[in-house]
Image (cartoon, rainbow, N blue to C red):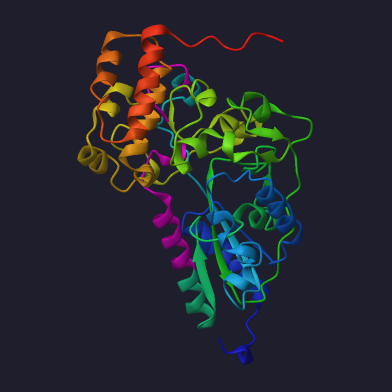
Amino acid sequence: MNLEDKPDFFQLAAKVRAWGQELGFQQIGITDTGLAEHEERLNQWLALGMHGDMDYMQRHGSRRSRPGELVPGTLRVISARMDYLPESQTDPQLLLQQADKAFISRYALGRDYHKLVRRRLQQLATRMEGEIGAFGYRVFTDSAPVMEKPLAQKAGLGWQGKHTNLINKQAGSWFFLGELYTDLPLPVDQPAVDHCGSCRACMDVCPTGAIIAAYQLDARLCISYLTIEHSGSIPIELRSLIGNRIYGCDDCQIFCPWNKFARYTNEQDFAPRHGLDAPDLLELFSWDESTFLEKTRGSAVRRIGHERWLRNIAVALGNSPSRQDVISGLQAREAHPSALVREHVAWALERQRNGPAPGPRPA
């Protein structure tokens, strides 16, 4: 960009917000790159090992918390949010009570959001180029070492709740985030203010107690981590707490009072696909790898692969009421080539045949 042209950055920021809404974003905010306080918290969290197997959280060092190191020349971050909750979905609270059905996190019911959000951000950048000429930028959506939630909070899009997800006062928390790093000195927005108050609904409903303190999540206990990020054996003491959740967990959002203000998405790409809204556990467990790949084409679910898919469903089947067809379905996988699958199938069969193992005696 030729700075001699001296564009009106206040006017450009207003246009960016308008263009963002035209492109399907519900809100656009702008912030600087200062994340020193958040960097300190991140480093403390990593030092405690709460990231579990997510080595990528520390692999990039300070580039995650210092945007100018990730993309040299970055002065501002344009943060965007896009609603994703489909109106056509099954009521998630009811689905969690149906032990023969599988619960998949609501964000993963439709097409993978990464490409859609990134494409819209690229379109936004292209409009900006058409207005002022070439400038330095890079777009992201959960695709690089970016502290998207702290940046979104600084940009005024919402605050990080006690569950660490971003909450918007007018729209709840069912939305995706995306970022556009830029070298333009745009005016910044006021950070969002925390409105959690004394509420602890998310902490009280977390099935595994992963929210160990307000604003502090131990990923190693989180069902989303265990079913998506974690590639190994799910700790035995946590399996019975997972219920029928086979990909992610939304409890902290489902029961958050602010989500009474949540709005359904207008994006057709986020509508449920391939019957993943409220599918039958046994049917999903019967999928071979080619069926799994076909049924999850274009979905975020595909990233866990068929082995983890079977691992997760085996746990859910172990948590379902004892039935002969469930036992038969599990027996069909007893000799699976994967030791990981066999281990979880054996656990599930034990539960189906003999019921849950007795817990420890009270002290």
255, above or below 61, in the image: above
Instruction: Report the magenta residues as a range.
Output: 96-124
Q: Residue placed at 55% from the left, 61% from the top? A: 179
261, above or below 316, in the image: below
Q: Where residue 349 appears, x then y in whole percent?
A: 35, 16
Q: Where residue 359 appears, x then y in whole percent?
A: 57, 12
Count of labels in the image: 0
Q: Is residue 118 rendered magenta in the image?
A: yes
Q: Which of the image's four quarters has the N terminus?
A: bottom right
Occupied quadrant, residue 212 = top right
Q: Is residue 143 left or right of residue 212?
A: left
350, above or below 265, in the image: above
Nearer-the-camera pick, 359 or 268: 359
Nearer-the-camera pick, 172 or 107: 107
Q: Which of the image's four quarters has the C terminus?
A: top right
Q: Is residue 229 rendered magenta in the image?
A: no
Q: Residue furthest bottom?
A: 4
Q: Residue placed at 34% from the left, 44% from the top? A: 302
> Residue 280, can we see it?
no
Q: Residue placed at 54% from the left, 51% from the top? A: 26
Q: Is residue 282 left or right of residue 343?
A: left
Occupied quadrant, residue 168 = top right
Q: Where residue 30 appears, x then y in whole percent?
A: 65, 63
Q: Where residue 51 appears, x then y in whole percent?
A: 59, 46
Occupied quadrant, residue 275 = top left
> Residue 357, can we see it?
yes
Nearer-the-camera pick, 349 or 102: 349
